[in-house]
Structure formats: C-alpha cells, structure tokens
Image (tube, rainbow, N blue to C red):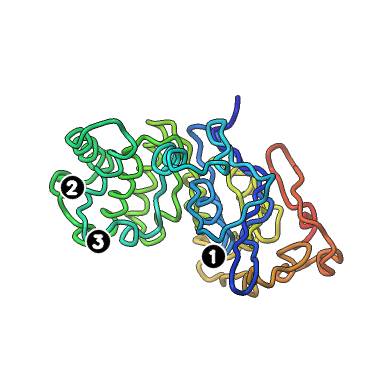
Amino acid sequence: MSHLLEVKNLDVKFDTDEGRITAVENISLSLDQGKVLGIVGESGSGKSVTAKAIMQLNPGNTNYNNDAEIILDDENVLRFTSKDDLKKIRGGKVSMIFQEPMASFAPAIKIGSQMVEQLLIHKDINKNEAKEISINMLQRVGIADAEKRFNQYAFELSGGMRQRAMIAMALSTMPKLLLADEPTTALDVTIQAQVINLIKDIIQEYQMGVIFITHDLGVIAQIADDVAVMYLGSVVEKGPVNKILKNPKHPYTKGLLEALPDVNNLDAPLRPIPGNIPSPLDRPSGCVFRTRCPNPCDNCRNGKTEMGLIEVEPGHWVDQCCINCG
C-alpha cells in the first residue's frame, strides 16, 4: 500500500543577497493515513521550510533540486504550477496550523468570514452551508457559544481559543494531511494538553495524516507515532517514537533528551548542547553536527564524512558517521 505522503531526496535552497543558502538537504520522509510524524529540532533546523514545501508556500527565491519528489495522493506537488493545482493542496488536500494564530488570522476580518471564504474556495457549497459547517467545526473543537465566536475578531479570543479556532478552520475542509507547525508552543500547559488531545481525537475520527512540528520532545512522546530529528536542514535520525526516545543513537538526539529537566531529580543541572547551530551561510563540510559534537570521530572532525542514513534496527535510521560519536 502506498503512503499518504512521501518526501524523497528533497533539497531546498534560497537565493539571497549573500548567495545561495541551503535550508534543507537531501531529506526523505513518509507518512501513512491516520498516523502522526513528529519533526523535532532547534530553530533553524529546516522544519517549517520542509512543511511549507509540501504546500508550496516557500517564497519566490526558493530552488528545489530536479530529482526531488513530494508525492501526495500519487501526485508530485513540486510539479504543480497552475492555480487550480495549487488550490487542490493549499487548504484542500492539505491544511496547516501555524504557530501564532494572531499572525495568521486577518485582524480586521471576523473569524467566521475567514472560515466561510476558504470553504467557498475549496468546496462546492453556498454561503449558508459554509457558515453551518464553520459553526459546527468550532463546536467540535470545544469552543463554547460557537455562533457568537463566529462573529468575533481574533483579538477578542483568548490564546487557547484562537488556537482552537485555527484548528477548526484547518479541519473544516476535511484535508487528508494536516501540518501542525508548533501549534502548542505559545500555550500554557493545560491548554496545550487540551489541544494535543483534540488533535488525537480528530486523527482517530477522520483518519488524516499529521505532521507535527515542535522543539518539545515531551509533546512528541504524547502524540507522535514516528519522529524525524532534524539538524541544520538534514534528518540525522528517524524512526518509531519509542525507539528514538528510549534508545537514541545520534549525539544530537541524545543532547536534546539530556537537555530536558528530570522530574525525578530536580537538583540535577540541565545539560544544554554546547555552542549554537551554525548559519546556513557557513554550513560545515561533511557531518553538519561535527562543530557541536561532544566526541566527534576523526572523520567527522576533519570534515571528510558524507551524510547518509543507515538502518540500525528495523525502522530506526541514523546518520552513518555519527553512530559511534558522542
């Protein structure tokens, strides 16, 4: 059976005044219907750029490699150029929940009007039907007095309610794939838990695939089936979430886990990964993590290794040069 989504050999580069920079390099991912793929990594790892490539939302200075493929429903979306083709994925087959809903909702237009507009674009329905669907979806995501909220502006809603309204908007078109870009980062822990449970319920009900982007491994442990760890545009480790969290092989994955607080030992100091993620303009040769690796091998240290994943156990893939590092 084919996957709902397959990303193959994807490079994403941007032309800038400083030159062409690599944001994503040679990544391959897959996602099945009804499953959640978590993508984790620090800011600047290429997580959002990867998600936006699926919806073709990266800016006009973007360059993709010729042999890259993003297969959704057996079609390569990187070959889509017409407005009709793009409309099929932007809000049609694919919806996206952004990190900050205040920056995504138009502040001078009522939330309901924005929900109705996108439904009229993607569905063959009239305005009254679109309103009914929108109010029903607001109710489904747990917004009380949905008809009143339908007629309000984004600034009149609390943070948690705005996030729920964005989820309702993303789901009202019944997409096959949901891209959730750090949807819980700006929320307090109780609202965060509610949003995670809501997304879980929706996945079960509609059997859609979800890519969940976050820097929070605790959230990934709660919601994801599989996880891909990204660093400086490369996937350095991927596999089932339990294998990655219980038996990490890459020193970067180990560093992310060691940086988490230990609730069983509150006196234990936090262990941040030393250094900072390099600029894409100054991308290290060979292994991209070698400048921050706690124990790089000779090949890594000299920048002579080539990146590439190998399977260390069924379904668990790790960058081949880093298995014995760290």
Can residue 239 be seen here? The reply is no
SS state under label 2: helix
Counting from the top left corner in percent of width and height, residue 11 is at 65, 53
The answer to which quarter of the image holds residue 93 is: top left
Q: Nearer the viewer, residue 3 or 19?
A: 19
Instruction: Please name which of the two marks, 3 or 1, marks the residue nearer to the observer.
Output: 3
Instruction: Please name which of the two marks, 1 or 2, marks the residue nearer to the observer.
Output: 2
Counting from the top left corner in percent of width and height, residue 326 is at 75, 63
Residue 157 sits above or below residue 126 on the image: below
SS state under label 3: loop
> Tags 1 and 2 in contact by the CB under 8 Å rule?
no
Q: CA distance from mark 3 to mark 2?
A: 14 Å
Residue 107 bears which disc, if any? Answer: 3
SS state under label 1: loop
Residue 150 bears which disc, if any? Answer: 2
Q: CA distance from mark 3 to mark 1?
A: 27 Å
> Tags 3 and 1 in contact by the CB under 8 Å rule?
no
Mark before the other along the chain sequence, 3 or 2: 3
Position of residue 308 in the picture relative to residue 209 (left or right):
right
